[in-house]
Amino acid sequence: MEDLYSYERDLIKQNITLIAGVDEVGRGPLVGPVVAAAVILPVNYKLDGLTDSKKLSEKKRDLFYDIINHDAISIGIGVISEKIIDEVNIYEATKLAMKDALNNLSVTPEHVLIDAMPLDIDIPRTSIIKGDAKSLSIAAASVIAKVTRDRMMYELDKKYPMYNFKKNKGYPTKEHVDAINQYGIIKEHRITYGPVKDYLEKSR
């Protein structure tokens, strides 16, 4: 079993206790925003079973989402729209979302643990490859970001049921791509992404 608190424990030993975990979700979908979350957990926090949100069932994610919202010292969310993703590219948009999430914290962290991305910020930081499976703070952020974005997709699904966003969450499944070819695109689609771009070129 991976020790999900080793990075935090090392920082706590240096009297650094306000530690923000940061993660994002939504780099791959063809539709909607990229969403990042920053979470500051209490010192020596434990939540059995919490890990990378992709490894959790939706029921478990929803449960952990409520617990983290209740227990966290602070939570910040960053949402960058599909329009900005198309303007600056997904890599830059992801960094913007992470910075917004940090700026939206009610408490300034002393150290930031980030899932994989290098981030140009004024706070000491550590980027951890596969951080959402190695740090409890990043895992908490991954759950908050994932549930936040999934709920946006459920709302979009109500407006455009033919794309089945409640199931595919906007990712480029065969069903989603077939729906684009049948019904066209909506304003929330990312026009710089392959299947959407292909559809636009074909329909010119």
Image (tube, rainbow, N blue to C red):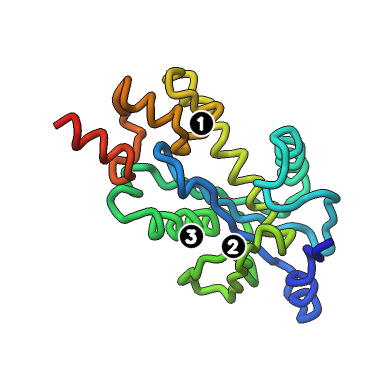
Kindly state the secondary structure of the residue where label 2 is placed.
strand
Q: Amino acid at mark 2?
A: Asp
Percent position of residue 167, x then y: 56, 28
User: Residue 78's mark?
Assistant: none
| Circle on res. 153 | 1
**Number of disc labels:** 3
Reply above or below: 52 against 182: below
Q: Nearer the viewer, mark 3 or mark 1?
A: 1
What is the distance, in whole Å, between disc 3 and disc 1 at their CAs?
A: 22 Å
The kind of residue on which mark 3 rests is Lys
The relative height of residue 116 versus residue 39 in the rendered view (above or below) is below
For disc 3, the marked residue is 99
Mark 2 or mark 3, earlier in chain: 3
* N-terminal-most mark, 3 or 1: 3
Which type of secondary structure does the marked residue at label 1 adopt?
A: helix
Question: Dot 2: within a 10 Å radius of its alpha carbon, few (fewer than 14), some, or many (20 or more) residues?
Answer: many
Q: Nearer the viewer, residue 69 or 90?
A: 90
Q: Which of the image's four quarters has the C terminus?
A: top left
**Which residue shows up at 78% across the image and 71% down it?**
6
Q: Relative to 36, is 197 on the left or the right?
A: left
Identify residue type, mark 1.
Met
User: How far separated are the C-alphas under marks 2 and 3?
Assistant: 13 Å
How far apart, in angstroms, are the residues tagged by discs 2 and 1? 23 Å
For residue 115, the mark is 2
- Quadrant of the frame with the N terminus: bottom right
Relative depth, front residue between 81 and 101: 81
Mark 2 or 3: in front is: 2
Q: Earlier in the sequence, mark 2 or mark 1?
A: 2
Q: Horizontally, is 166 left or right of 57 in the view? A: left
